[in-house]
Amino acid sequence: MQGHTRETSYRAYNAYASFILHLYEFLISLHARDLGVTEIKAKKGKNQHDLLDILIQSTANKVVKNRIFRIEQGLAPEWENHISSYQRIMPIPTQFAQDLRRMRNKVAGHVTY
């Protein structure tokens, strides 16, 4: 890696890890707020992570569909990405939420330099 130091690589990894961790926690907190609770708990017999995956998956679908709708209706801000940016990621892969959760768990630590 010409021009890159080990420290730069570690800092980049830590920044990426922090972003993934905070994004996941932010999405969970939005759902908790909407449900009027401080913690989202699955009903008996269900895995907590399955419920969270469903919530995050539905949010991802809703956000992208809303972006497409606003662009089509001429309601998107001037700086909005081109509609093709959103159309090419639809449908959101069914494993998106599960993959995001797994990546969040994987990068939850940090590296030191």
Image: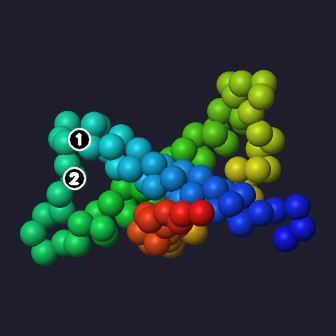
Report the label total: 2
Q: CA distance from mark 2 to mark 1?
A: 8 Å
Numbered disc 1: secondary structure: helix
Mark 2 or mark 1, whichever is nearer to me? 2
Residue 81: x and y in percent read 77, 39
The residue at 76%/50% (across/down) is 85
10 versus 24 height, above or below: below
Q: What is the residue that sits farthest to the right in this orientation?
A: 2
Q: What is the residue that sits farthest to the left in this orientation?
A: 44
99 versus 66 height, above or below: below
Using the image, tell me which numbered label, if any, was put on residue 35. Answer: 1
Q: Amino acid at mark 1?
A: Leu
95 versus 97 height, above or below: below
Q: Nearer the viewer, residue 70 or 43?
A: 43
Q: Quadrant of residue 70?
A: top right
| Image quadrant containing the C terminus | bottom right
Using the image, tell me which numbered label, if any, was put on residue 103. Answer: none
Give neighbour class at mark 2: few <14, some 14-19, many 20+ (Cα, 10 Å).
Answer: some
The residue at 38%/64% (across/down) is 53
Which residue is label 2 attached to? 40
Residue 8: x and y in percent read 72, 58
Residue 44: x and y in percent read 9, 69
* Tags 2 and 1 touching, CB below 8 Å: yes
The residue at 74%/33% (across/down) is 80
Q: Nearer the viewer, residue 37 or 88?
A: 37
Q: Point out the tag, 2 or 1, that comes first from the N-terminus.
A: 1
Residue 74 in sight from this viewpoint: no
Q: Amino acid at mark 2?
A: Ile
Q: Quadrant of residue 32?
A: top left
